[in-house]
Image (cartoon, rainbow, N blue to C red):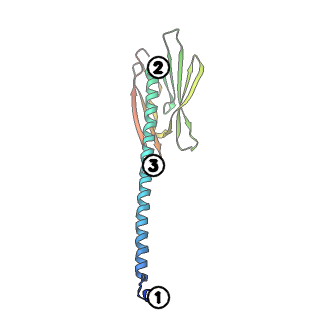
Amino acid sequence: MKQLEMKKLHKDQRGLTLIELVIVIALTGIITAAITMTIFQVFNMNTRASNRMTAVSQVQHAGKLVSQDILEAQTVMAGDTAGFPLSLNWTEGGVSGDSHEVIYTLENMPSGEFKRLQREHKINSVHESTTIVAEYIDTDQTSFYPLGMLPAGGTLTFTVKATVGKESETRIYRVQPRPGS
């Protein structure tokens, strides 16, 4: 008797038809694709935001350091190619004080596409330090003006652009060296 009941149960059971199975697989594929695209967009937006913040940070840091040094400078000499190298000189504490020289140059990055803004500092003609001020610098959009010796009472305009990925930031700094320079 039990065998009869078992056979009867199997006979009455229904499975998925081929059409139902295809619909389930298609819906699962659509849902998986939607989730994958959403995750990809979140990662892409995060990368873009990170690149943007890096570019902003680079131009802000460059502007801050260059401006501080220009404010100290008694002599400002911008080079012939977009103002590079930029040479700044001052004597700390009057005539008998330490003599400072800061030179800003653009150096190649390993990727080769952009440059690094490098700061070399000498005190009494002795090398004190060399630091990387900013990276990802776009040389076509970065410059010091006027070129050559800054006239007395003149203002130096420093334009800097950093590009990271597809995100970029440009800032213009106008700095007048201290009086008497």
149 on left or right of 126: left
- Badge 1 marks a residue whose secondary structure is helix
- Badge 2 marks a residue whose secondary structure is loop
User: In the rendered image of this protein, does residue 40 appear above or below residue 129?
Assistant: below
Indicate which disc, 2 or 1, sits on the residue closer to the N terminus. 1
| Residue drawn at x 44%, y 61% as measured from the top left | 36
- Badge 3 marks a residue whose secondary structure is helix
Q: Quadrant of residue 113?
A: top right
Residue type for callout 2: Ala
The disc placed on residue 47 is 3
103 or 57, nearer to the observer: 57
| Residue tagged 1 | 2
- Residues packed near mark 1 inside 10 Å, few (<14), some (14 to 19) or many (20 plus): few
| Residue tagged 2 | 73
User: In the rendered image of this protein, does residue 169 appear above or below residue 18?
Assistant: above
State if disc 2 and disc 3 touch (CB < 8 Å): no
Residue type for callout 3: Thr
Indicate which disc, 3 or 2, sits on the residue closer to the N terminus. 3
Give residue 71's position: percent from left, percent from top.
Answer: 43, 21
Mark 2 or mark 1, whichever is nearer to me: 1
Residue type for callout 1: Lys
